[in-house]
Image (tube, grey):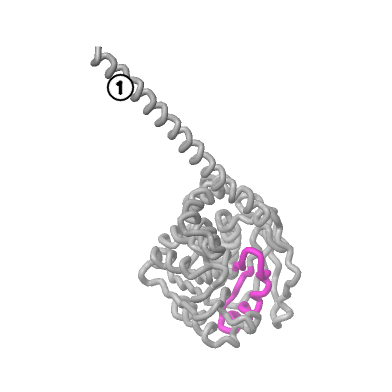
Amino acid sequence: MSNEINKESSIVTKKLKNKKIKKYRKIICIFMGLIILIFSSIPVIIMPKYINIHVNYEETYEAKDFGLSSEKLTLTTEDDINIVAHEVFTPNPKAVVIFISGIYNPSVTAFFGHSKMLQENGYSSILLELRAHGESEGNVICLGYKEYLDTRAVVDYIKSDNKYKNVPIVVYGASMGGAVAINSLGQIPEIDGLISISAFSSWEDVFYDTMVNMGIPKTLAYIEKPFVKLYTTFKYGFDSFHISPKSQIKKAGERPVLIMHSTEDSEVPLANFKRIMKNAPEHAESWVRKGNLHFIVKKDYFLNPQDDKEYSERILNFLNGNFAK
């Protein structure tokens, strides 16, 4: 009789224990579901207002402001977006440099000063207005995931024009433009060289860095990264999944590469530079400049980069060392 009572008691205890386990599992599942819901909703709530826009610049420049002449180009990308570019031609150029600016500022026309410096040293240049910027079509900023198609359109133009026959192509990008430049190098084998300034290593990386800089604990910021990646993959298509500067730099091969960043960059932290350089080829050149200089060139000299001797010498030495005939 005693054994039966003990057996029934054991069964009841086991049932109560199983009931508690199921209850705790349910609580954990609900909690995890809430966590996933919260973290997955952050990019959905935050990002659209920053990327579903067309950037119209308050301040733009013309080639004549710098004593240059230029030709406006209208080119069509593989995904049928009309983009505008500004060509500054030099007879018998050593190379043609494609300039790409950042996510919001400045207008790429601010690089006419760079065009002047390059023209005086034997280089042609093309200033590319990315999709959803300036005079180019589009209402979605693609964060570097699709803008390499814009670069592709410029490269196709260069390759089809006899005045650029056998002329090397160098892509130069700053900030998001740096990310676009690196992605373009990885996706377009016809590009012969790269100059990248203050590029982010991936969008989820810089999203993480921004959260940490806002005081959010690193663990929570890290948990957010895959949800940002999931959002951009659905936003820009599954082909974008493997597109990031830190992965595309691996495809540089033997092509000349110059990657620059500043030590205290408040927009794209130096950690992004380190992630990119970790995957860059051994021959890649780099320059880390002291200070918070997002565009590397000193602010007062941006429109006239030749006045920033340290910066201009870095650019010209890289170009002349790799592309001078």
Query: Camera-side residue: 19 or 173?
Result: 19
Please state the horizontal and vertical placement of residue 6, each as a whole percent of the image. 27, 19
Q: Position of residue 41 (x, y in %)?
A: 59, 46
Quarter of the image for residue 255 reads bottom left
- How packed mark 1 is, by other alpha carbons closer than 10 Å (few <14, some 14-19, many 20 or more), is few
Q: Quadrant of residue 124?
A: bottom right
Residue at (70%, 70%) from the top-left corner? 71
Residue 141 at least partly seen: yes
In reply to whether residue 206 is colored magenta, the answer given is: no
Nearer to the camera, 127 or 158? 127
Q: Secondary structure at mark 1?
A: helix
Q: Left or right of 317: which side holds 74?
A: right
Q: Give the residues drawn in magenta, as a range.
A: 100-127
Which residue in the rendered view is the most extreme toward the top?
A: 1
Q: Residue at x 51, y 52 (%)?
A: 224
Name the residue at 52% across, 62% down: 212
Say how many tags the image has: 1
Query: Residue 113: within the magenta?
Result: yes
Q: Quadrant of the N terminus?
A: top left
**Does 80 appear above or below 111?**
above
Q: Is residue 115 left or right of residue 246?
A: right
Residue 188 in view in this figure: no
Q: Which residue in the rendered view is the most extreme toward the front? A: 2
Vertically, is 19 above or below 208? Answer: above
Q: Is residue 271 above or below residue 208?
A: below
User: Residue 95 at x, y = what percent?
Assistant: 53, 74
Disc 1 marks which residue? 10
271 or 136: which is nearer to us?
271
- Residue 5: percent from left, percent from top: 29, 16
Q: Residue at x 51, y 79 (%)?
A: 315
What amino acid type is highlighted by mark number 1?
Answer: Ser
